[in-house]
Image (cartoon, rainbow, N blue to C red):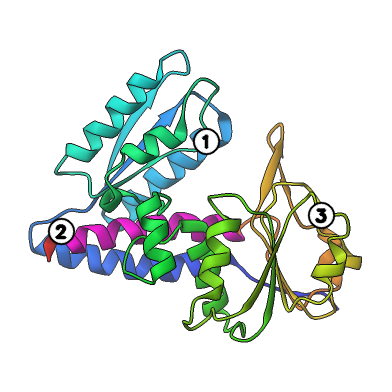
C-alpha cells in the first residue's frame, strides 16, 4: 500500500494565507514589510530559489529588495551589501543566498548581519535563542518541517525521530527544534550522517525519519520501518534534475512521505516570509 503524501504546497498555502492577512493589517497602519535577498554569482538553483521568493513576496504584499553580486566581485562587496540591508529602514529581514561561490566567506557575512533582520534564522544569536526557547526567527526549513507535521497532525511528542545530516541550515537546528518541550516536538532525537557505517540500524527503529544529507537515495526501502513517516529535506542536483535523499521506492513501505517535488521546498519559502512578517510586526510594536 502506497504511503500518504505530505504535500508541502498545501501547508505553504495555509501559512501564506495567514501572512497575507497580517501584512494587510500592517499596511493599514502604514507599514509594508520588506524582504531583502543577496545573490552572489549565477548558480542556477540559487537564482531559481531567489526568484521564487521574490514572486511569493508579491503574492502576499511584502516588498522585495534585491542585490546581485557577480562571482568575479570580492568579499568586500558582499559585506557592503549586508551593511546596506542592516541600515535600510525598508528591509525588515533579509537572506544571503547559500551556497556562495568560491572565494566568499558566508560565515563572516552572517556574523555581520543584524540578528533581528535574519530571515533565515541562522545567525548565532538566533540559534542561541532557539536553544533557550526565546522568541526569534527559526531556521526556515526546520520550521517548515515542523509546520508540515503539525498540519497533518503527525504525532511527534515522545516519538523516536532520526535525522540524517548535521548541516547548519537543516539537520543541526532541526535536532534542536524537535527536542524542545513544545507541541509537535518533544521527541527523542538521534542525529546521524553519511559517515555512519550502518544507517539502517538507526532508521529502522524510527517513527519519523528526516533525511537532510544532500546524498541522493541515501534512504532506501529496507531502512524504513513499515508505516514510518519519511521526510526528504536534503536535495542535490544532476544538471537540472533534482535528486532527493529518499529513494522513490520508500513510498511502498512508509506510512507518510514527502513527494519528490512539492514537499519541503514550498514550506521553506513560506516560513521565510513568515519570519519577515514577524520582524515587521516587531518593528510596529
Q: Gap between marks 1 and 2, in whole Å?
A: 29 Å
Front of the two marks 1 and 3: 3
- Residue 95, horizontal then vertical, whole percent: 38, 43
| Quarter-of-image position of residue 4 | bottom right
Confirm whether residue 9 shows in the render. no
Q: Secondary structure at mark 1?
A: helix
- Residue 214, horizontal then vertical, whole percent: 70, 47
Image position of 217 with respect to 258: above or below = above
Residue pictured at 46% horizontal, 82% vertical = 182
Image position of 133 with respect to 199: above or below = below
Q: Relative to the observer, which residue lies in front, 168 or 117?
A: 168
- Residue 156, horizontal then vertical, whole percent: 61, 82
Residue pictured at 20% horizontal, 63% vertical = 281
Which residue is tagged 2?
A: 283
Q: Residues within 10 Å of mark 2 (few under 14, many from 20)?
A: few
Which residue is tagged 1?
A: 46
Q: Which mark is residue 196?
A: 3
Q: Which of the two labelled residues, at mark 1 and mark 3, occupies the earlier sequence position?
A: 1
Amino acid at each position: 500500500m502506497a504511503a500518504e503524501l505530505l504535500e508541502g504546497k498545501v501547508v505553504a498555502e495555509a501559512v501564506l494565507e495567514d501572512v497575507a492577512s497580517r501584512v494587510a493589517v500592517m499596511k493599514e497602519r502604514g507599514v509594508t514589510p520588506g524582504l531583502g535577498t543577496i545573490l552572489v554569482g549565477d548558480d542556477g538553483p540559487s537564482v531559481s530559489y531567489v526568484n521564487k521568493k521574490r514572486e511569493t513576496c508579491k503574492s502576499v504584499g511584502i516588498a522585495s529588495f534585491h542585490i546581485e553580486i557577480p562571482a568575479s566581485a570580492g568579499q568586500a562587496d558582499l559585506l557592503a551589501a549586508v551593511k546596506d540591508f542592516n541600515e535600510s529602514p525598508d528591509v525588515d529581514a533579509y537572506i544571503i543566498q547559500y551556497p556562495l561561490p568560491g572565494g566568499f566567506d558566508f560565515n563572516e557575512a552572517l556574523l555581520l548581519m543584524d540578528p533581528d533582520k535574519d530571515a533565515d534564522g541562522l545567525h548565532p544569536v538566533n540559534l542561541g535563542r532557539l536553544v533557550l526557547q526565546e522568541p526569534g526567527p527559526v531556521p526556515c526549513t526546520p520550521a517548515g518541517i515542523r509546520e508540515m507535521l503539525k498540519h497533518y497532525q503527525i504525532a511527534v511528542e515522545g516519538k523516536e525521530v532520526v535525522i540524517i545530516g548535521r548541516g547548519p541550515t537543516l539537520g543541526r537546528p532541526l535536532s534542536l527544534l524537535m527536542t524542545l518541550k513544545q507541541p509537535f516536538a518533544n521527541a527523542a532525537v538521534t542525529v546521524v550522517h553519511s559517515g555512519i557505517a550502518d544507517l539502517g540500524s538507526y532508521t529502522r527503529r524510527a517513527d519519523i525519519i528526516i533525511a537532510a544529507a544532500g546524498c541522493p537515495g541515501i534512504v532506501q526501502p529496507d531502512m524504513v520501518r513499515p508505516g514510518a513517516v519519511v521526510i526528504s529535506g536534503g536535495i542535490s542536483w544532476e544538471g537540472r534534475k533534482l535528486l532527493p535523499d529518499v529513494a522513490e521506492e520508500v513510498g511502498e513501505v512508509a506510512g507518510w512521505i514527502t513527494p519528490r517535488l512539492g514537499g519541503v521546498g514550498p514550506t521553506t519559502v513560506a516560513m521565510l516570509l513568515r519570519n519577515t512578517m514577524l520582524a515587521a510586526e516587531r518593528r510596529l510594536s
